[in-house]
Image: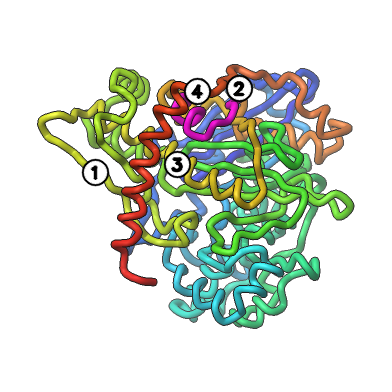
Amino acid sequence: MAYLLGYDVGSSSVKAAVIEGETGKCVASAFSPQTEMAIHAPQPGWAEQDPEQWWQELIQATRQLRKHVDLQQVQAIGISYQMHGLVCVDEQLQVLRPAIIWCDSRAVEIGRRAFRELGEDFCLQHLLNAPGNFTASKLRWVKEHEPQQFERIRYVLLPGDYIALRLTGVASTTLTGLSEGIWWDYQHQQLSEALLQYYGFTETLLPPRVPIFGEQGHLTDQAAALLGLRAGIPVSYRAGDQPNNAFSLKVLHPGEAAATAGTSAVIYSVAGQPLADNLSRINTFIHVTHQPHQPRYGLLLCINGAGIANSWLRKYWQNSGYVDMNDQAARVPAGADGLLFFPFGNGAERMLENRLLFAHLMHLDFNRHSGAHSFRAVQEGVAFALRYGHDILQQLGSPARIIRAGMANMFLSPVFREVFTHVTGCVLELYETDGAQGAARAAGVGSGYYASLEESFVGMEKKMELHPQQALRDLYENVYQQWKAQLMRLIEALPAT
């Protein structure tokens, strides 16, 4: 029996899944911790986590798998991970400081300055993005504010690079990783010398590059003993959570799109040419299926606050469970009786040009609105924010009419599914898969167990398909336009940047 193991290292938990190679059936899955990992915010707009905790939770999730499946039969390992984070390690490959993760906003002004001084045309033509709040800008923040730590850095890693390091003992990164850190010059097809020089970095800070699908290293004796796996099995795939989620849903080619609604909410659309948004609200990266002769780019619309808003409500409103919250939301009419929610309370939003808008619950009436109204308003607000970004994607020339998502997180809610389908006007296909299962399938491709990408999707099951209905489209369009008008007023009230 041949098994394939996938890890999905998120900011809420580490998920692990084992699939049976021949059938594609998921035979075991687990996650750790059972409550969401903390995100530390030493100052407003900051977000940090300890990389050691990711590793310890990965160990715990793997130990749970061992109760259900013989991990000695695992043939390959794939890694999915939270994107855009910064992990700094020294000469001994030890972590120097807490990881600055994806939703941290401290480097926003550094990125804005780089966009101006490097030149907007240069950034959009060569980097396809403003340097923004991405990994390179986060590293510049460390150089400016923690110079002694900066001098000790041997390698700069993404969260997935760090997990691969713990598994294999080797520091490395991938082409997709270089693109998500805004290190890659798309015109010259190499590291951006201009960006490195501007920020005062040498390219030796970036580890050697390994293939996205293919041998990236082998499991060390020490890691194998901790995890209950065979030493020497290959790590054969690595990608950020959003391109990996797209792969998990068989979103491989131009015109196809994937969505998630976990801690953050995303629509990720594949293009065959390097599109750039002049305002960098949508970000373009190299997709996992990219080949020099057949380029593939991922257009990423990200809203930082989605499931984290739902989670905040669950914690602080009578500790309701998600199923109960969904049931209560379903009993409230569309529009939540005028209550509007803006889910922007998890750092600066790229979709809003890196503005720090914060979350808002507006038009609250103590005599009319209950907790159920809040539950519904949050789900509608997340869907409306995705619609706002979906319109930008369409303007850029990414007109996907079918969006695929995993049957997980906010897509488990009938209310959220209904609002999302009708406010975007897209067919929504839901599959029984997740990022960890996708990473396991991809590991099978990278190790050669599967002969092709198509073969790796054996056994993937579609659970549901929703089509927009005109009456509901009209209803939600009306509520969305009210929401959008209020959003414009909130943005106009912000101080000039």
The residue at which mark 1 appears reads as: 362
Quarter occupied by residue 229: top right
The residue at which mark 3 appears reads as: 263
Mark before the other along the chain sequence, 3 or 1: 3
| Spatial CA span between label 1 and label 2 | 35 Å
Disc 3 residue crowd, few under 14, some 14–19, many 20+, Cα 10 Å: many
Mark before the other along the chain sequence, 4 or 2: 2
Quarter occupied by residue 368: top left
Disc 1 residue crowd, few under 14, some 14–19, many 20+, Cα 10 Å: some
Q: Amino acid at mark 4?
A: Gln
Task: Magenta stretch: give its range.
Answer: 417-429
SS of the residue under disc 4: helix
Q: Amino acid at mark 2?
A: Glu
Quadrant of the snapshot with the C terminus: bottom left
The residue at which mark 4 appears reads as: 470
The residue at which mark 2 appears reads as: 432
| Spatial CA span between label 4 and label 2 | 28 Å
Q: Amino acid at mark 1?
A: Met
Task: Identify which residue is drawn at 58% across, 17% down.
Answer: 464
| Spatial CA span between label 3 and label 1 | 22 Å
Task: Identify which residue is drawn at 64% across, 71% down.
Answer: 123
| Spatial CA span between label 4 and label 1 | 28 Å
Mark before the other along the chain sequence, 1 or 2: 1
Please name which of the two marks, 3 or 4, marks the residue nearer to the observer.
Answer: 4
Quadrant of the snapshot with the N terminus: top right
> Which x, y percent locates residue 256?
69, 37
The reply to whether the C-beta atoms of the residues labelled 2 and 3 are less than 8 Å apart is no
The reply to whether the C-beta atoms of the residues labelled 3 and 1 are less than 8 Å apart is no
Quarter occupied by residue 488: bottom left
Please name which of the two marks, 4 or 2, marks the residue nearer to the observer.
Answer: 4
Mark before the other along the chain sequence, 4 or 1: 1
* Side of 496 where 319 appears, left or right: left
